[in-house]
Image (cartoon, rainbow, N blue to C red):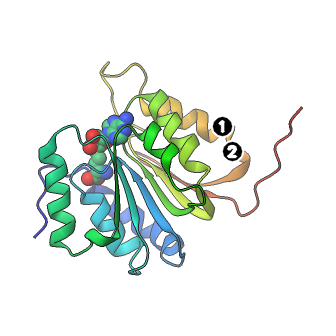
Amino acid sequence: MARFTTDWFSHVIPLWKEYAVPRVVRGDSDGLEVGTYEGRSALWTLQYLLPQSHRRLYCLDLWEEEERRSRFQANVAARGVDQRIVQLQGPSSESLRKLPEDSKFDWIYIDGSHEARDCLTDAVLAFSRLSPGGVLVFDDYQWNARGRVHHPPRVAIDAFLHMWGNQIEILHIGYQVMISKSAKTPVTSQK
Ligand SMILES: C[S@@+](CC[C@H](N)C(=O)[O-])C[C@H]1O[C@@H](n2cnc3c(N)ncnc32)[C@H](O)[C@@H]1O
């Protein structure tokens, strides 16, 4: 049985069922998660968004505490999905740059660093790997930082939505922000 110490995820399940499931299940590519912790969102993703056995989930995390990483590994093994996980430990800004050159994802979940500059870096690097029609979700848009970070994720997410506005469809804005990549992305002017 999978075991978790914290639940940051269950409250978004209705949202994911409404917006992500219909778009992601029909795809054929893998998924990518920035911020996996003990694997709660990852296990749900594999079961409901990427149910086909050939689809994998790339899980990126610092896993600073060995206990968290062990629990994650035990959880995916308990559910029998360990072979469908690609585990990349380290700062996401580095792991995202090490992804296989030709990798494309139908699903991307950004739930890693709560520092806006990291969140923006994650978004920019990850979005370039999102398939047309694929879904990208940001967590923590309405997180109350109370001074714990220099800038909270909202600043980064707003900047991203603004700058990439002509390449995305906004599906939902609330505590999470859900977007889909437009089928045709306009050619960027070099001027
Ligand atoms: C809120 S938890 C993720 C929860 C998980 N998605 C779930 O729903 O169960 C955030 C995770 O992001 C990871 N993290 C924080 N900063 C990171 C960074 N710069 N690169 C990679 N992972 C990071 C932390 O180690 C932590 O495990």
Residue type, numbered disc 2: Gly
- Residue drawn at (80%, 51%) of the image: 186
Alpha-carbon span between mark 1 and mark 2: 5 Å
**Quadrant position of the C terminus in the picture:** top right
Q: Position of residue 167 (x, y in %)?
A: 71, 51
Front residue of 68/47: it is 68
Q: Which residue is mark 2?
A: 165
- Residue drawn at (34%, 70%) of the image: 84
Q: Is residue 41 above or below residue 67?
A: below
**Horizontal side, residue 113 vs residue 180: left or right:** left
Label 2 crowding class (10 Å Cα cut-off): few <14, some 14-19, many 20+? few
Front residue of 33/135: it is 33
Whether residue 113 appears in this view of the structure is no
Asked if labels 2 and 1 touch by Cβ distance under 8 angstroms, the answer is yes
Q: Is residue 57 above or below residue 125?
A: below
- Which numbered marker is on residue 162? 1
Q: Position of residue 15 (x, y in %)?
A: 40, 61
Identify the secondary structure beneath mark 2.
Answer: helix
